[in-house]
C-alpha cells in the first residue's frame, strides 16, 4: 500500500491538470484511471496521434501536450477504483486483475461525465449506440460507422460528432435534432454572458454552418421519436416540426441527450449534492476550491456538474493549489496568487453554461417516460409502467423501489436508470426531484469477480467487513 500526498481518481482534463500543478509544488501524486489510456472523454486517444486526428479540432490537438506534461511516476491507467473509505483510502483493481490500495493524505475525485441515458422505445436493440461512445471509438481507434448512420437527439456533442464524421469523409445519413424551439428562444436571455466567451460561441456556430453546407439530411425540432426493428434496429420514426411523420432506414442509430456527472465515487462516500434544475442533474456540493462536504475529499471537473473541458482543467488546478496549501507546501498568499487567473477563467466558462443549458434542454430521455412499455432499468428490465405502478402501491423513493421491482439492483447500480426513476417518482408524487434523490451507491462501484477481491492481501478483513 502506498501513501502519497494526493491520489486522483480520473485521468481526464481535470485529473491531469491537477497532477501537473501538484507535482510542480512538490506533492507526491498517484492517479488511477480505469481506461487503458489516459485523457478522459475529451482527450481520449490524444496521446496516440494519427493523421485523421488533426481533423478532430484545435482543442483536441492540445491533448498530446497535456498528456506529455502529466506523464510521470504514479500514473496508473487501466486501474479501476472500486471502493473508497471516508478517509480517502482507495481500493483499486490493477490491469493484472489484482487489488491494490492507496492511503492518500488528500483525495481528488475527477471522474468526469457520462452520457444521459435515453430510455426510448427500441433503444435496447442491437445497432443502437450512444453518440459519445461512437465519438470515443473515433478518437481512440479512428473507427467510423459503416453503412447508414443516423444521429438522433439534442446537445452540442451530437452536432460536433456530425461535423467530425463529415470531416472524416463519413457523412451521417441524417441528423434528427430534438432541440425544441422554446430552447432556442429562451437562449436569448443567456446570450450576454455567452458573448464573453466568443471562442466557444464561434465554435458552435462553426459546427452549424459546416452541417448546413453538407448534403446530410437535417431534421430539426423532431418529436415522438422511436426505433423499430426485429433482431436489430432498422429505422427511426419521428414527427418533424411541420407535424409530418417520417421513417428513416438506418444501419446504426446514435442517440444523445447531453451529459451528466459521473458521480458514483462521491455518492459512495455520501458527499452532499444538490439538484441543479438548469443542468437537469445532481451536482456534488463543493466549495470554490473543490472540497466536498467531507473534509480532505475534493471533487472537480465534470463529476461535480457539467462545466466543460476548460473549466475542468481550471478546477483541477485550483483544487491542487488548495490541497498543496492544506498540506503545507504553499501558504494561503501563494495559493491565492496562483489561483487568481484560473478562478477568473473558470468563472467565464461557468457563466457560459446557461446558454448551452437553455439551448439544449434534455428532451429525448424525458419523452420516453410517458410510454409505460419503455424499459427504464436495462439491467433488470423494469419498465416505466412498472415503476409508476410500484409508486402508486407505496414505493416512495428509489431505494424502496428496489424491493418492489428490483429497479436499480443490477450491475450498473443505477447508472442507466437513476435519473429516470427520480423523474418518474417526482411526476407521480408531485415531490421535487431534489427531494427524491437517487439510489444509494455501495462498493464495489462496478461488479468484480470474487477471485479478484480475494487478491487483497493487506486488507481482506476490512473489505469483507
Ligand atoms: C462520451 C463523452 C464525450 C465527450 N466529448 C466531448 C467533446 O468532444 N468535446 C467537449 O467539449 N466535451 C466533451 N465531453 C465533455 C467532456 O468530457 C468534459 O467537459 C471534460 O472531458 C471533463 O473532464 P474531466 O477530467 O472532468 O472528465 P473526463 O474527461 O470524463 O475524465 C474522467 C476520467 O475518470 C475515469 N474514471 C471514472 N471513474 C473511475 C473509477 N472509478 N476508477 C478509475 N477511473 C475512473 C474515466 O475513465 C475518465 O478517463 C464529452 C463527455 C462524454 C461523457
Image (cartoon, rainbow, N blue to C red):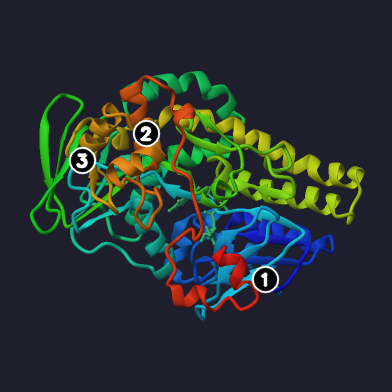
Please name the residue shown 27% across and 36% down the image: 387
The numbered mark at residue 116 is none
Of discs 2 and 1, which sits in the foreground? Answer: 2
Q: Give the Cα distance between marks 2 and 1.
A: 37 Å
From this view, report whether residue 449 is shown above or below residue 247: below
* x, y percent for residue 299: 64, 47
Marks 2 and 1 in Cβ contact (< 8 Å) = no
The numbered mark at residue 71 is 1
Q: Closer to the camera, 134 or 449?
A: 449
Which residue is labeled 3 in the image? 374
Relative side of 124 to 10, left or right: left
Q: Give the Cα distance between marks 3 and 2.
A: 17 Å
User: For the residue labelled by badge 3, is the local secondary structure a helix, a strand or a loop?
Assistant: loop
Relative side of 297 to 371, left or right: right
* x, y percent for residue 242: 16, 24
Other-residue count near label 2 (Cα within 10 Å), few / some / many at <14 / 14–19 / ≥20: many
* x, y percent for residue 229: 10, 52
Other-residue count near label 1 (Cα within 10 Å), few / some / many at <14 / 14–19 / ≥20: some
Q: Give the Cα distance between marks 3 and 1.
A: 45 Å
Which residue is labeled 2 in the image? 362
From this view, report whether residue 448 is shown above or below residue 255: below
Please name the residue shown 63% across and 71% down the image: 459
Other-residue count near label 3 (Cα within 10 Å), few / some / many at <14 / 14–19 / ≥20: many
From this view, report whether residue 244 is shown above or below residue 248: above
Residue 210 visible, this angle: no
Marks 3 and 1 in Cβ contact (< 8 Å) = no
* x, y percent for residue 42: 51, 55
Q: Is mark 3 within 8 Å of ligand 1?
A: no
User: For the residue labelled by badge 1, is the local secondary structure a helix, a strand or a loop?
Assistant: loop
Amino acid at each position: 500500500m502506498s501513501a502519497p500526498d494526493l491520489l486522483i481518481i480520473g485521468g481526464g482534463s481535470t485529473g491531469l491538470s491537477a497532477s501537473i500543478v501538484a507535482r510542480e509544488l512538490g506533492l507526491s501524486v498517484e492517479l488511477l484511471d480505469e481506461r487503458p489510456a489516459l485523457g478522459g472523454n475529451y482527450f481520449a486517444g490524444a496521446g496516440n496521434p494519427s493523421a485523421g486526428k488533426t481533423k478532430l479540432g484545435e482543442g483536441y490537438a492540445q491533448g498530446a501536450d497535456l498528456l506529455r506534461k502529466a506523464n510521470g511516476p504514479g500514473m496508473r491507467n487501466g486501474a479501476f477504483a472500486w471502493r473508497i473509505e471516508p478517509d480517502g483510502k482507495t481500493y483499486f483493481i490493477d490491469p493484472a486483475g489484482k487489488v491494490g490500495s492507496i492511503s492518500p493524505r488528500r483525495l481528488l475525485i475527477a471522474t468526469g461525465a457520462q452520457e444521459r441515458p435515453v430510455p426510448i422505445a427500441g433503444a435496447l436493440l442491437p445497432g443502437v449506440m450512444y453518440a459519445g461512445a461512437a465519438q470515443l471509438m473515433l478518437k481512440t481507434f479512428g473507427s467510423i460507422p459503416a453503412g447508414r448512420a443516423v444521429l438522433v437527439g439534442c446537445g452540442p456533442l451530437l452536432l460536433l460528432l456530425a461535423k467530425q464524421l463529415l470531416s472524416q469523409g463519413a457523412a451521417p445519413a441524417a441528423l434528427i435534432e430534438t432541440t425544441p424551439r422554446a430552447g432556442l428562444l429562451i437562449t436569448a436571455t443567456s446570450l450576454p454572458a455567452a458573448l464573453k466567451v466568443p471562442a466557444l460561441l464561434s465554435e458552435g456556430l462553426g459546427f452549424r454552418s459546416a452541417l448546413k453546407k453538407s448534403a446530410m439530411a437535417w431534421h430539426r425540432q423532431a418529436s415522438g421519436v422511436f426505433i423499430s426493428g426485429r433482431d436489430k434496429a432498422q429505422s427511426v420514426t419521428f414527427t418533424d416540426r411541420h407535424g409530418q411523420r417520417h421513417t428513416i432506414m438506418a444501419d446504426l442509430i446514435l442517440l444523445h441527450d447531453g451529459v451528466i456527472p459521473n458521480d458514483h465515487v462521491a455518492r459512495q462516500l455520501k458527499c452532499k449534492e444538490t439538484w441543479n434544475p438548469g443542468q437537469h442533474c445532481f451536482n456534488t456540493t463543493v466549495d470554490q476550491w473543490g472540497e466536498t462536504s467531507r473534509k480532505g475529499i475534493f471533487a472537480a471537473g465534470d463529476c461535480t456538474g457539467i462545466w466543460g473541458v476548460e473549466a475542468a482543467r481550471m478546477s483541477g488546478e485550483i483544487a491542487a493549489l488548495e490541497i498543496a496549501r492544506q498540506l503545507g507546501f504553499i501558504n494561503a498568499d501563494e495559493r491565492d496568487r496562483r489561483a487568481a487567473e484560473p478562478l477568473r477563467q473558470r468563472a467565464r466558462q461557468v457563466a457560459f453554461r446557461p446558454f448551452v443549458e437553455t439551448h439544449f434542454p434534455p428532451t429525448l430521455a424525458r419523452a420516453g417516460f410517458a410510454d409505460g412499455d419503455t424499459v427504464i432499468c436495462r439491467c433488470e428490465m423494469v419498465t416505466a409502467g412498472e415503476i409508476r405502478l410500484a409508486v402508486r402501491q407505496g414505493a416512495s423513493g428509489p431505494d424502496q423501489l428496489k424491493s418492489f421491482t428490483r429497479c436499480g439492483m443490477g450491475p450498473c447500480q443505477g447508472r442507466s436508470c437513476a435519473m429516470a426513476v427520480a423523474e418518474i417518482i417526482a411526476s407521480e408524487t408531485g415531490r421535487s426531484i431534489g427531494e427524491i434523490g437517487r439510489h444509494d451507491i455501495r462498493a464495489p462501484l462496478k461488479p468484480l469477480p470474487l477471485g479478484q477481491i480475494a487478491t487483497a492481501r493487506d486488507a481482506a478483513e476490512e473489505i469483507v467487513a
